[in-house]
Amino acid sequence: MKEASQSGSRVRVAVQTPAHSGISEPLTYITPNPLAAGTLVRVPLGQREVLGVVWGGAAAEPEGAALRAVSAVLEGLPPLSEGWRDLVEFAARYYQRAVGEVALAGLPPQLRELGADQLARRLARKPRAVPDAAVDGDTARLPTPEQAAVLAELRSGDAGAFLLHGSTGSGKTEVYLQAVAELLEADPEAQALVMVPEINLTPQLEARFIARFAPIYGAGAVVSMHSGMTNPQRLGSWLAAHLGRARIVLGTRMAIFASLPKLALIVVDEEHDPSYKQQEGARYSARDLAVWRGRREGAKVLLGSATPSLESWWGSRPPSDGDAGGRYRRLAMPSRVGAGDLPTVRLVDMTLQPPRTRLSAALVDAIAQRVARGEQSMLLLNRRGYAPVLACGDCGWKSECPHCSAYRVFHKIDRSLRCHHCGFAERVPRACPACGNLDIAPVGRGTERLEEELAELLVGVQRPDSEGGGPVRIARIDADSTRHEGALAQQLAQVHDGTVDVLVGTQMIAKGHDFRRITLVAAINPDGALFSSDFRAPERLFSLLMQSGGRAGRDSAWLAAQGSRAEMWIQSFHPQHPLFAALRRHDYPAFAEQQLEERRGASLPPFAFQALLRADARTQEAAQAFLTAASAAVDDLPEAAAVQRYPAVPLAIQRVANVERAQMLVESESRVALQRLLAQWHPRLHALRRGPEGQGIIRWLVDVDPQAI
Ligand code: ADP
Ligand code: ZN
Ligand code: ZN
């Protein structure tokens, strides 16, 4: 590599600088030939040579500064578009991160490693031809009147964002498919981005898109982007999208940064799902960025959900007296396709049950009847493992994690105590470590124990002869049972094949699956969320219950032939709670109205905007002292009056892996004021970190529009 000669033109290049360096802008290099903005290059950084993106704008370095030269240009790749660079700049500014970090995180990891000639070879390689015969074709269904109305609205409307509020089973996926189909047909270059919260949980969606579009546009027209893919696969998808060969990109939140030069439509399925918020690095919301990107690119954005986020619901309110209404257009599909009714909601009043009842007799009976008819049931519990703690009845010892302020969970299957926060695991002790008592016992219920109890309660229940007879088959799906690769897909396949009668699991089974033979869904103990300190907990619970209820009775013809009906059971100590009343009527709008009322009264989002400043340190005092000093450091700003800064507090789980964590909530009714304050805070925080208040601080971060407080 040649040492930098000072002749040539200057370019700004976005590179990934270390987070603690405090550098948030692209760096300046020199180049013998001018380079177009968006060009991918390799440049020296410290002792290394790294991937960078040529950025627009004037170089800031003073004349005469010693500049290093661009080492290589990745030929053969068209530059990243201005729209893409704008998206990166916006995301970096809004979420308070460096432009280079966001830009590089938005590119496939393998691109960083490839030299210029390796890339040239990769580009010369022909895309792998997938024989079209390998694809089971699928043709468009005739839209229902509701679907047709939604598609017509989408077609007639200008670019902009739409919120599709459609019941579970109303055929939202079919709307996405047909909207994409119309777009690709109308414009031979147009591209669509379809995002789902967790692509690993929805292989069905991928299959449906491939079945629908591969026969028309070839198998390479649909590509995926998610973290479950290998680096070569991700590079392949990225190149296909960037070069315009892929017409449809399906992906998780990371796909929002895909390079799509002809982007014309973005679909965000299950737009309310918290998984759209990235929880490390740049803590972006892929849903919110989708709306921004759509506006920037003149593309339509379709947000879909049966239980929209309250932000999107409020953002799509119709105009009324003195209110211009929201910026999104609201579309509705209230009916289920095939007239399958939404499940009947049954509330079990747990205060009327015998003490210590976990599964009410009525519920067990309802499950048994379904097993006997060859139908499936699904039970939800929000805690995996066998029991949340192991305790000593003599001295009061509990299975605390030595590294976290949390209990380790008892897993009977391998007789371990496992911390769900830091992962620390040990074999269960024979006797109480504190007093030697041999009689230590599990307290509370997790999915593992529920599975065991249910098996005991259903002993003797037989499947019908038409289904081969035999005892009930129970399966459990949670983070433990799906640890091995392919395990989840295999377990889901069993549910689809009907080789499972009762499915027990955490909320990971509630999302999106199109199970055909489930007729009963039960929430075993959902009360915790009713009185949570997190103001979003009721919204999450309502959506979880609606979504999981939506798994029941999805095949109305089969249901009718069975002479059965779909039911959603809820066991609660607070059956009178208004949340359940709305759920019983499947009335999301009523629930949303009540919640928005509360949020308005308490000045919470969407009526206020929030950010969290978090500090991790060796001691809680150090973490809080840093936050307190940080707050004082912006007292002089004019925006400070419009932005409320709350006192520093420990996180709910205060200590994880021996790190103490504290946070400070920052809130304003003006998003602009909040953003201005955050922008000026950033350099001051870096300075603070280097000074005496930074002593003992391990890291700090800003989370804009946090999902949990
Ligand atoms: P959602 O995504 O809203 O929960 P889906 O798109 O999965 O609903 O549709 C539910 C079921 O209805 C699916 O099995 C789907 O194939 C079927 N379906 C959707 N639209 C139609 C239609 N227009 N005609 C026939 N069946 C349809
Ligand atoms: Zn003891
Ligand atoms: Zn731990």
Image: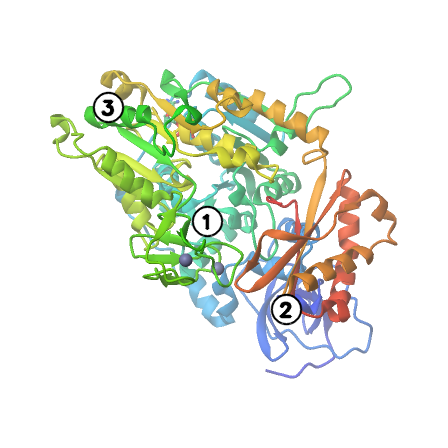
Q: Quick check: 536 above or below 684?
A: above
Q: Quick check: 599 above or below 231?
A: above
Tell which quarter ligand 2 is in.
bottom left
Q: Which residue is mark 1?
A: 245
As drawn, the label of residue 369 is: 3
Closer to the observer: label 1 or label 2? 2
User: Which quarter of the rendered picture does the N terminus lie within?
Assistant: bottom right
Closer to the observer: label 2 or label 3? 3
Amino acid type at circle 3 is Gln
Sequence-wise, which precedes: disc 1 or disc 2? 2
Residue 176 at x, y percent in the picture = 47, 32
Amino acid type at circle 2 is Pro
Sequence-wise, which precedes: disc 2 or disc 3? 2
Crowd band around label 3 with a 10 angstrom C-alpha radius: few (<14), some (14–19), many (20+): some
**Label 3 near label 1: C-beta < 8 Å?**
no
Note whether ligand 1 is within 8 Å of mark 3.
no
Coloring applied to the structure: rainbow
Q: Quick check: 408 above or below 40?
A: above
Closer to the observer: label 1 or label 3? 3
Q: Nearer the viewer, residue 85 or 557?
A: 557
Q: Which residue is mark 2?
A: 18
Question: Is residue 302 visible in the rendered structure shown here?
Answer: no
Q: How far is mark 1 from mark 3, CA to CA?
A: 52 Å
Q: Secondary structure at mark 2?
A: loop
Q: Secondary structure at mark 3?
A: helix
Sequence-wise, which precedes: disc 1 or disc 3? 1
- Residue visible at 48% across and 46% down in the picture: 252
Amino acid type at circle 1 is Arg
The image quadrant that residue 20 belongs to is: bottom right
As drawn, the label of residue 75 is: none
Q: How far is mark 1 from mark 2, CA to CA?
A: 34 Å
Question: Is residue 184 visible in the rendered structure shown here?
Answer: yes
